[in-house]
Image (cartoon, helix red, strand yellow):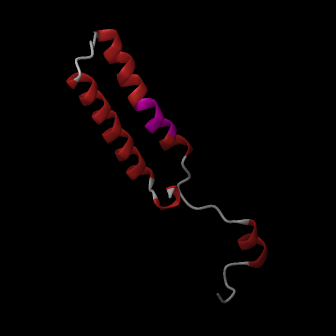
Amino acid sequence: MLNDFTRARLIQVWLALVGLVVTAGYAVGASVTVGTAAVLFALCLVPPAITMILWPDEQLQTADEMLRGDDRPA
C-alpha cells in the first residue's frame, strides 16, 4: 500500500490526521495550554520532517536489475 504513496501525499495524510485529532480533542473539551500546544505543534511537524529527509527521491535499483540490466525483454 505504501509503495503507491508519494512523499507529499503521505505528509498531507499525516497533517490531515493531526488536524482531525486536534479538532476532536477540542470538541470533547480538552484543556490546551501554551505548553501543550507547543508540544503538539512539535510532534505534528517531526514525522513529516523525518519523512522528507529519509524518503528516497528515486527508486533504487534492485539486485536483479543491477545484475541483468534493464534492457532485457519482459
Please provide percent x and percent y for residue 56: 56, 52
Which corner quadrant of the image does residue 17 belong to?
top left
In the rendered image, the residue lying farthest to the front is 28
Q: Is 37 colored magenta in this rendering? A: no
Of residues 24 and 70, the one nearer the viewer is: 24
Residue positioned 51% across, 55% down in the render: 2
**Relative to 24, residue 54 above or below:** below
Would residue 17 appear left or right of 68 to someone viewing this image? left
- The relative height of residue 17 versus residue 10 in the rendered view (above or below) is above
Residue 73 placement (x, y as % from top left): 66, 89
Name which residue lies at 38% across and 52% down: 9
Q: Nearer the viewer, residue 25 or 60?
A: 25
Q: Quadrant of residue 36?
A: top left
61 vs 48, left or right, is right
Residue sitting at the far right: 67
Q: Main secondary structure of the magenta part?
A: helix
What is the magenta range? Answer: 45-50
Residue 48 forms part of the magenta stretch? yes
Residue at 27% in and 12% down: 31
Q: Residue furthest bottom?
A: 73
Number of marks in the rendered image? 0
Residue 44's spot in the image, x, y percent? Answer: 39, 30
On screen, residue 36 above or below 6: above
Instruction: Determine the residue positioned at 44% across, 38% down.
Output: 48
Q: Is residue 65 left or right of residue 26?
A: right
Q: Quadrant of the C terminus?
A: bottom right
